[in-house]
Amino acid sequence: MQMEPKELVGCEPHEHVPLEDPSTLEAQILPVADFFQNNTCYDFLPNSSEVVVVDIDLKLQHAFSVAQDNNVTFASLWDSQQKKLCGMLTITDYVKMLLHFRDDPEGMQEFWNLPIRTWYQKRTSKPTLPSGDIIHCSVEDSLYQALRLLHIHKIHRLPTLHGGNLLHAVCRPSILGYFVANYPMDATLFSHSISDLKIGTFGRIFTGTPQTPLFTLLDTCVNRGISAVPIVNEDGRLLDVFSRYDVMNLAVEAEHSLDSTIADVNAAYPSNQVFTCTRKDTLREVLQHLMRTGAQRLVCINESKAVEGIISVGDIFDFFVGYGDNITKDPESPKPEQS
């Protein structure tokens, strides 16, 4: 089955300011680091928010049904025995279950009816500290501390607790929205190209084709720790992007096996646009494009529409935090649990 190329929507082009002297970059980033240091997770909290919490002894099937019904890709886990939050159940867990039981559908059905605790105990890595407490931030912590925890522990969301109660789950896209809305974008830093700033992943980018099996893409996402794969044609031209979050559609319908091709899945759940950028686009353009589209990543392409790299919201904050750690006092952070 063939795939029709999606509409590629790029950044609005503007002239960039060359970074003539890389040694000036730290001074340009310092005000950004100060912004994240001076704004707390309380400042960032929305006026109202919804969090999904499920008991760790709830059946897996029911837990994912709750997530689907609430249109979320994760749920916080509550241990009623210890009377505290103990972790999260995410779309990555669902993907790992699909891969684990690929050749054993009956075993998957049996496992599906077991409590979350059974699966959670099998996990080799958990978002917890040596004390057993879930990795979290408080409302008094700065956004900089929250970003560092996300960066250090390689997690996508961070519970915000107050008095032991879960108020919110901090994630990079929501911090990005707060940052763009409250920080002036006219500084020279934002006029440099992403190429000059070395933001994003370039070079050996894993790509799929319309004929790539779903299993191969999901297995690669899990083993390489990536969240999305560009889909290209035989000439290397970008056609679409497959995200592991797209698996939620499969969870709802359960119509496709892992041997289905990406073209099969795409035909059932078509998307209209793919959001892109180029190496010459400025940091300002990339930030605004991410905000305007609500995308979590942009595929960087050349003039021939061939894939050159990927820039995610996480890459942008890793850039800020990485430089910020060199020019600000390093906040103390507990080490992750060793598996």
Image (spheres, rainbow, N blue to C red):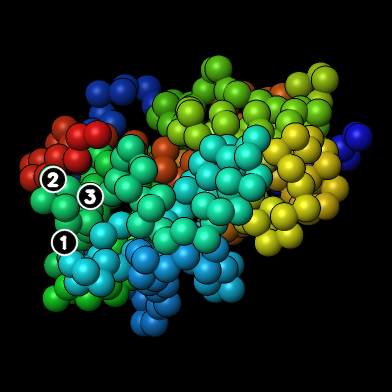
Whether residue 198 is visible to the viewer of this picture, yes or no, is: yes
Q: Determine whether the residue tagged by mark 2 lies in a helix, strand or loop.
A: loop
Q: CA distance from mark 1 to mark 2?
A: 21 Å
Image position of 62 (left or right of 135): right
Question: Horizontal and vertical percent for residue 262?
Answer: 76, 37
Image position of 261 (left or right of 84): right
The dot on residue 130 is 2
Whether residue 154 is visible to the viewer of this picture, yes or no, is: no
Between tags 1 and 2, which lies in front? 2
Question: Horizontal and vertical percent for residue 167?
Answer: 29, 74
Q: Earlier in the sequence, mark 1 or mark 2?
A: 2
At label 1, counting other C-alpha atoms closer than 10 Å, the crowd grade (few under 14, some 14-19, many 20 or more) is some
Seen at 58% across and 40% down, the residue is 101
Q: Would you place residue 143 above or below residue 12 in this image?
A: below
Q: CA distance from mark 1 to mark 3?
A: 18 Å
The answer to which image quadrant residue 153 occupies is top left
The dot on residue 141 is 1
Please give the residue where the numbered disc 3 appears in the rendered image: 128
The dot on residue 177 is none
Q: Nearer the viewer, residue 219 or 18?
A: 219
